[in-house]
C-alpha cells in the first residue's frame, strides 16, 4: 500500500474495489468446484440410491453436467449474477430465499459475538499492554491463552449444562420461544451462542491488541511524549491508542472471518437456525446447490468485510498513500 | 542455541505447555497398555455410568463403552491426525512459498493470487466446503484442514525467502557460481526453518481443534472410532443425565490444544530476538 500516487481516497477505494474482483472470481471458481470436483456423478449422488437412470439423466441435463466445464461455469455464474442459485432438491425450493433467510440469523449471531469480542478483547488487550508485567496483565493473558485453546463447540455445551440445564437462566437451543415473540425473546436466546462464539474471538483479540499496543508504546515518539512531561493517561490516549487503531482494525477483519467460520459449529451446538447449521445438514444430504449458495454468500460477505477494513485503514491512517 | 533454551526454560508457561504435550503424547503411545478395556466394547447393562464406577474409572458412554479407554485411544487419533495435517500443510505451504519467493515473476503472481483466494474464505468454512466436495471422513478431514492452512505457511516462507535473497552471503554464493536450486535448498531453506518450526507449534493446536470440530459436525472421523470430537457430538443427547460424557472429551481437547499453544508461544518468544 506504499508508493506515491494521485487521486486520494476515492481513487484508492476504486482501486481496492477492482482488486476485489479477481478474488471474487477465485471464490466463485472454488464454489463452482464444490459440485464439479466431487468424486462420482453428482447427479446420482444428489438423487440417492433409489433414483432411476432416467431421473439421473434428467438432473444431469437440468444441472448442465453434460456440457464442457467452462460452459457450465459461465452458465452457472450467469445464473448467480441474476440471483438464481439453483434449486435444493431435498427442500424442493429455490436456494436464494432459503440462504438469505438463514443468513440473517447467522449475521445476528456473528454481530452479537463480535460485540462481546470487541468489548472484552480490546479492554483486556489495552489494559494488559499499558500495565505490562502487572498481575492484571498476567491474569488477562492467562485467561486469553485459555480462551484461545477452548474449542467453541465444547464451550457451548458446557454453557448449556450450567446456564440452561442447571440454572435455567437461558434457553439451550433455537432463536425464539414457541409462544414468545419480539426482540427481547431473540436476545434472550442469543446470549449463550454469542458468548460461546465471542469468547474465543475475545481471547485472540486481547492477545493481538496487547502486542500491537506494546509495539507502539516502545516507539520513540511515545518516549518523547513522556519525556516532555505529558501525563501517562494523555500519552496513552493521544499517542498510543490513536496509532494502535489500524492494527486493531486489521485484526478485527480477521476475527470476522473466524466468527463466520466458528458460527457453523456454534449454530450446530445451539440449533441456531443460521446458514452454518443448514450447510452441515445440506452436506450430509448431498444438497450441493444449497451448500454452494451458503458458501458463496458467506465468502462474499467476508471479501466485502475485508474491503471495508482496508478502506477504514486508509481513512484512519493518513500516512497511507493511495496509488 | 543455548540462548534459545535459556529463554525457553525461564518461561513457566512454556514449560507447562511442553509438559502437557509430553503427557498427552505418552498417553497416546501407551494407550493399549493403559486402557482398562477395549474402547469399542459395548456393555448395554452399564450405559452412562458415572465417574468412579467400579471397573470404569471415568464412567461409560451411551453404549456402555469405557470412557477412559476411549479417551486414551482418542488421544492417538487427535495427535496423529493433527500432526499429519500440520506436516502436510507445512510441506505444501513451504514449497509454494519457496517457489513464489525464489522464482518470482508469474509463478509468484499465480501462487500468491491462489493464496489470496484461499484466504478470502473464513478458515473453518473452507474446510467444510472441501469436505462438501470430497465427502466426510478422517482422511478427507485431514486434507481439508491441511489445504486451509497452506496460505499460513506459504506467506511465512515467501517473506523469509525474499528477505534472505537480499543478504550478502546469498549474493556471494551466487557470485561464486552456486546453482539457483542449490541456493534455494541450502541457504534459503535453512533460514526458513526457525519461522516454520514456530509456525508449526503455534498451528498444531488450531489444527487439532479444527479436526475435532469437523468430527463434531459428523464430517470428520466417523463412529464408532473413538475420537474426541465425535464423542462430544454423541454426548449432546445426554447432557441432562450424564454431563461428564460431554465434559471429559472436551477437556482432553482443551488441555492438548493449550499445551501446544503455550509451547508455541514459548518457542516464538525464545526464537524471536526482537522480544528479548
Image (cartoon, coloured by chain):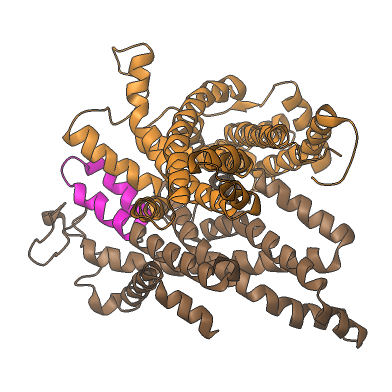
Chain colours: A orange, B brown
Helix, strand or loop: magenta stretch: helix
Q: Is residue A15 left or right of residue B66?
A: right
User: From which residue to which does the magenta span run?
Assistant: B228-252
Q: Is residue A173 left or right of residue B95?
A: left
Q: How many marks?
A: 0
Please, which residue is most extreme toward the bottom here?
Answer: B176
Question: Residue A236, position in %: x, y?
Answer: 53, 42
Q: Locate residue B32: give its quadrant.
A: bottom left
Question: Residue B106, position in %: x, y?
Answer: 88, 57
Question: Residue A149, position in %: x, y?
Answer: 40, 55
Q: Magenta span has B193?
A: no
**Quadrant showing the C terminus of chain A:** top right
Can you say whether A286 is above or below A214 in the image? above
Q: Is B54 or B195 nearer to us in this picture?
A: B195
The residue that appears at 30% across and 48% down in the rendered structure is B234
**Quadrant showing the N terminus of chain A:** top right
Answer yes or no: is residue A285 visible. Answer: no
Q: Magenta span has B240?
A: yes
The residue that appears at 67% across and 40% down in the rendered structure is A31
The residue that appears at 46% across and 56% down in the rendered structure is B211
Answer yes or no: is residue A288 visible. Answer: yes
Q: Is A111 or A138 nearer to us in this picture?
A: A138
Q: Is residue A92 left or right of residue B11?
A: right
Please, which residue is most extreme toward the left here?
Answer: B54
Question: Residue B53, position in %: x, y?
Answer: 9, 61
Can you say whether A191 is above or below B271 in the image? above
Amino acid at each position: 500500500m506504499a508508493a506515491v500516487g494521485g487521486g486520494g481516497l476515492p481513487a484508492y477505494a476504486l482501486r481496492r474495489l477492482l482488486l476485489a474482483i479477481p478474488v471474487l472470481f477465485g471464490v466463485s471458481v472454488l464454489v463452482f468446484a464444490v459440485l464439479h470436483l466431487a468424486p462420482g456423478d453428482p447427479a446420482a449422488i444428489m438423487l440417492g440410491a433409489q433414483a432411476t437412470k432416467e431421473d439421473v439423466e434428467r438432473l444431469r441435463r437440468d444441472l448442465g453436467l453434460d456440457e464442457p466445464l467452462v460452459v457450465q461455469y459461465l452458465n452457472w455464474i450467469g445464473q448467480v449474477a441474476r440471483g438464481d442459485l439453483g434449486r435444493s432438491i431435498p427442500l424442493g425450493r429455490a436456494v436464494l430465499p432459503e440462504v438469505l433467510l438463514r443468513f440473517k440469523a447467522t449475521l445476528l449471531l456473528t454481530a452479537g459475538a463480535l460485540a462481546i469480542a470487541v468489548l472484552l478483547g480490546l479492554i483486556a488487550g489495552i489494559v494488559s499492554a499499558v500495565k505490562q508485567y502487572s498481575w492484571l496483565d498476567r491474569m488477562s493473558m492467562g485467561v486469553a491463552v485459555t480462551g484461545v485453546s477452548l474449542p467453541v463447540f465444547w464451550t457451548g455445551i458446557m454453557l448449556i449444562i450450567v446456564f440452561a440445564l442447571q440454572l435455567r437462566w437461558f434457553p439451550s437451543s433455537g432463536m425464539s420461544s414457541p409462544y414468545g415473540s419480539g426482540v427481547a425473546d431473540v436476545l434472550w436466546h442469543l446470549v449463550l451462542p454469542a458468548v460461546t462464539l465471542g469468547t474465543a474471538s475475545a481471547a485472540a483479540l486481547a492477545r493481538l491488541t496487547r502486542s500491537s499496543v506494546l509495539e507502539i508504546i516502545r516507539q520513540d515518539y511515545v518516549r518523547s511524549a513522556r519525556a516532555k512531561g505529558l501525563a501517562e493517561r494523555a500519552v496513552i490516549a493521544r499517542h498510543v491508542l490513536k496509532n494502535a487503531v489500524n492494527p486493531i482494525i486489521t485484526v478485527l477483519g480477521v476475527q470476522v472471518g473466524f466468527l463466520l467460520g466458528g458460527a457453523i459449529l456454534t449454530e450446530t451446538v445451539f440449533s441456531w437456525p443460521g446458514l452454518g447449521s443448514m450447510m452441515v445438514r445440506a452436506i450430509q444430504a448431498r444438497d450441493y446447490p444449497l451448500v454452494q449458495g451458503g458458501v458463496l454468500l458467506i465468502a462474499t460477505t467476508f471479501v466485502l468485510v475485508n474491503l471495508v477494513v482496508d478502506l477504514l485503514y486508509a481513512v484512519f491512517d493518513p500516512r497511507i498513500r493511495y496509488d | 542455541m543455548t540462548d534459545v533454551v535459556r529463554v525457553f526454560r525461564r518461561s513457566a508457561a512454556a514449560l507447562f505447555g511442553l509438559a502437557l504435550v509430553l503427557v498427552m503424547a505418552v498417553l497416546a503411545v501407551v494407550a493399549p497398555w493403559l486402557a482398562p478395556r477395549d474402547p469399542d466394547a459395548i456393555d448395554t447393562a452399564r450405559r452412562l455410568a458415572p465417574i468412579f464406577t467400579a471397573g470404569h474409572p471415568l464412567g461409560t458412554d451411551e453404549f456402555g463403552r469405557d470412557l477412559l479407554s476411549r479417551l486414551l485411544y482418542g488421544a492417538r487419533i487427535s495427535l496423529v491426525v493433527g500432526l499429519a495435517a500440520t506436516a502436510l500443510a507445512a510441506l505444501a505451504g513451504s514449497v509454494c512459498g519457496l517457489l513464489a519467493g525464489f522464482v518470482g515473476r508469474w509463478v509468484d503472481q499465480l501462487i500468491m493470487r491462489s493464496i489470496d483466494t484461499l484466504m478470502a474464505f473464513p478458515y473453518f468454512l473452507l474446510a467444510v466446503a472441501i469436505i462438501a466436495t470430497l465427502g466426510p471422513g478422517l482422511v478427507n478431514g485431514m486434507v481439508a484442514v491441511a489445504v486451509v492452512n497452506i496460505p499460513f505457511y506459504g506467506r511465512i516462507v515467501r517473506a523469509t525467502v525474499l528477505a534472505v535473497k537480499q543478504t550478502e552471503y546469498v549474493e556471494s554464493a551466487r557470485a561464486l557460481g552456486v546453482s539457483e536450486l542449490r541456493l534455494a535448498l541450502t541457504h534459503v531453506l535453512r533460514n526458513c526453518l526457525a519461522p516454520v518450526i514456530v509456525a508449526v507449534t503455534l498451528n498444531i493446536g488450531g489444527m487439532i481443534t479444527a479436526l475435532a470440530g469437523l468430527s463434531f459436525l459428523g464430517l470428520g472421523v466417523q463412529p464408532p472410532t473413538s475420537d474426541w470430537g465425535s464423542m462430544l457430538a454423541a454426548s449432546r443427547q445426554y447432557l441432562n443425565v450424564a454431563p461428564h460424557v460431554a465434559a471429559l472429551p472436551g477437556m482432553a481437547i482443551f488441555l492438548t490444544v493449550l499445551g501446544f499453544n503455550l509451547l508455541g508461544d514459548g518457542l516464538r518468544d525464545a526464537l524471536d530476538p526482537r522480544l528479548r
